[in-house]
Amino acid sequence: MQLDRRALFTKALAGGLASATYSCRAATASKLGIPGPFPGRVIAVERPGVVINRKYQREVVRQMLAKGMMELTGAPSPQEAWRFFFEPSDVVGLKLNPVGRPFVMSAPEMVQEIIAGLGMAGVPPKNIVAYDRYRQEFRQAGFDKWLPEGVRWTYGTDKIHPLQLDMDMYDSSQYVEMPLVLPEANPRDPHHRRSYLSKFITKDVNKLVNLCVLKHHQSAGVTIALKNLSHGLVNNVSRSHPTPTLNTCGTFIPNIVDHPIIRQKAVLNILDGVLGAWHGGPGGKVEKYVWEHNTMYFSTDPVALDKTGWKAIDERRKAAGMLPIATAKPDADSNYLNMQVEHIEIAGVLGLGEFSDQKISVRRFKLG
């Protein structure tokens, strides 16, 4: 069977991926690891009224999470659905997202109900660890203030290093190396060419719940499941998009997520699309582009999930008279030359999930 030019280009790009080198090429096999037991399956649960005046209604959040988890796994109860992924001996990480605060970020009601779900599976609070990369952003988002008692939290760094190369909370033995450096860095220094994994993902936890949000991103096009992993679990990420024209998110994101440890441990992706941002992301300018999408998505497949979220954002952009992300050009609220949403397709070529619409099954449920 012949491949068309676009397919050949994509495969060549994915095969090279800027000649990435990994600190390890194998990890303990896990049937739950990316793309997980349900490749291509995405569950969408919609419920009008889940937010009132931008405030999440916790009982409705509980209902939506229960429905989504049962439909994803086929389990007869929420408890059995959570037990499909987790058991009492697990130490479970919860990757949060504070960027875009206070408009589009990990909501306390979502986090608390996910923690309650882990409790249904028998995971004790002490074995649950909430995380994001920057300690300062974690606290500014207020995550530390509303985590349930006993749940731990950690971060990747307590510093804002000019080159993002501090190693205090990172694992020097686990990295992804690429011939890509910041303009002010040293291209001959291996340390400057590497992104090291956080000790949180290499040492602290054995499974990860990826709680992502539905949001536009100037350089990556969207920031959903894949980017929440790639730019949250390693250091030295600014090298992927330091300027509007020096932008390599298209290959950087799948490179990082392809690290065997991340692939093994990221077992569940929950996309909070209750509130979304269709432009102006990832942070400062999202307020005027926030909309109530009133939908949560569930998948073990981050590629299928991101493809589905990307479509939702493009639909909202179309309703606002804007071009799709893949063809839009810079404007006052998004100044990157090209938004590299192709990171999702390249991740699919790498086997991180299903990108083809023919292989993605989105099952939609609307609660009354």
Image: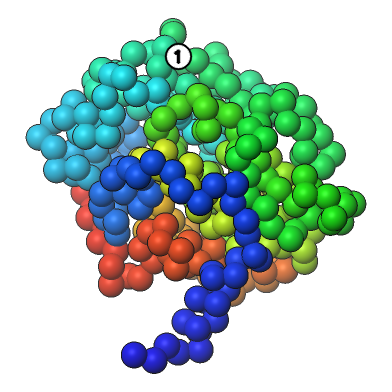
Q: Position of residue 230 (x, y in %)?
A: 57, 47
Q: Residue at x 13, y 37 (%)?
A: 75
> Which residue is at a point 42% across and 88% down the rendered structure image?
3
Quarter holding the N terminus is bottom left
Compared with 338, 22 (above or below) is above
| Crowd tier of the residue under label 1, counting other residues whose Cα lies within 10 Å: few below 14, some 14–19, many 20 or above | some
Furthest-left residue in view?
Answer: 76
Q: How is the image coloured?
A: rainbow
Above or below, 219 relative to 95:
below
Picture quadrant of residue 61: top left
Q: Which residue is mark 1?
A: 151
Q: Relative to the observer, which residue lies in front, 259 or 271? A: 259
Residue 238 location (% of width, % of height): 74, 48
Q: Quadrant of the C terminus?
A: top left
In the foreground, 343 or 67: 343
As drawn, is 26 to the left or to the right of 47?
right
Would residue 135 appear left or right of 163 to someone viewing this image? left
Residue type at mark 1 is Val
Q: Position of residue 222 (x, y in %)?
A: 54, 56
The residue located at (67%, 35%) in the rendering is: 172
Residue 183, position as x, y percentages in the image: 86, 56
Residue 316 appears in the figure: no
Number of numbered tags placed on the structure image: 1
